[in-house]
Amino acid sequence: MPQKAGRVAAYVVLFLLGVGIAFIGAFTQAAYPPAGLIVSLAGSGGLFVAGGSLLKTKAGAAVPVAGWMLTVLWLASWTKPEGDWIFVSGFLSYIYLLGGTIFGVAAATYPWGGIKPVLLSGESVKTRTR
């Protein structure tokens, strides 16, 4: 049971890190063009890869992607009281949204637990270990 609780705690932390990276990246990519965009995308991609490689599961990468995606979509639809949008209609904002989504999908579909070769007949390939 403690191992399962630790894994659940890791998923919660990864989700919250995804929310934080999305929030910081949303403002960084617009504030410091083009370096802010590069840093924001690198941080997002790094978190997605770190989650998958540390937990060795696709869910380890998908959980921070979910936190990032929900936060970015919420920020994209939200306006400040002055009437300003968080994501302005510009090239860098679209690159951040599209690039982060591509990184997220790539990280969430990567086989982090390893690839088990399968023959066309459906049988597992037996590998020799020495």
Image (cartoon, rainbow, N blue to C red):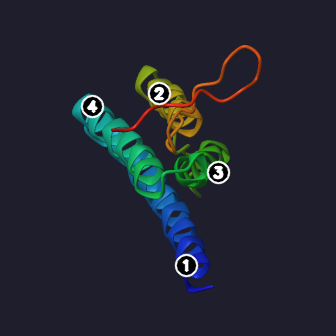
Disc 4 to disc 3, how far (Cα)?
24 Å
Binning the other alpha carbons within 10 Å of mark 1 as few (below 14), some (14 to 19) or many (20 upward) gives few
The mark that comes first in sequence, 1 or 3, is 1
Q: Secondary structure at mark 1?
A: helix
Binning the other alpha carbons within 10 Å of mark 4 as few (below 14), some (14 to 19) or many (20 upward) gives few
User: Outermost residue toward the front?
Assistant: 130
The mark that comes first in sequence, 4 or 1, is 1
Mark 3 residue type: Leu
Where does the N terminus fall, quadrant-wise? bottom right
Q: Is residue 70 left or right of residue 27?
A: right
Q: Nearer the viewer, mark 4 or mark 1?
A: 1
From the image, tell me which residue sits under label 4: 33
State the image coordinates of residue 37 (x, y, percent, origin top left): 33, 33
Binning the other alpha carbons within 10 Å of mark 3 as few (below 14), some (14 to 19) or many (20 upward) gives some
Mark 1 residue type: Gln
Q: Nearer the viewer, mark 2 or mark 1?
A: 1
Disc 4 to disc 1, how far (Cα)?
43 Å
Q: Secondary structure at mark 3?
A: helix
Comparing 90 with 38, the one in front is 38
User: Outermost residue toward the bottom?
Assistant: 2
Mark 2 residue type: Gly
Comparing 29 with 67, the one in front is 67
Specify the label residue 97 is tagged with: none
Whether residue 3 appears in this view of the structure is: yes
The mark that comes first in sequence, 4 or 3, is 4
Residue drawn at x 33%, y 45% is 43
From the image, tell me which residue sits under label 2: 99
From the image, tell me which residue sits under label 3: 70
Q: Is residue 89 above or below residue 82?
A: above
From the image, tell me which residue sits under label 1: 3
Residue drawn at x 59%, y 58% is 81
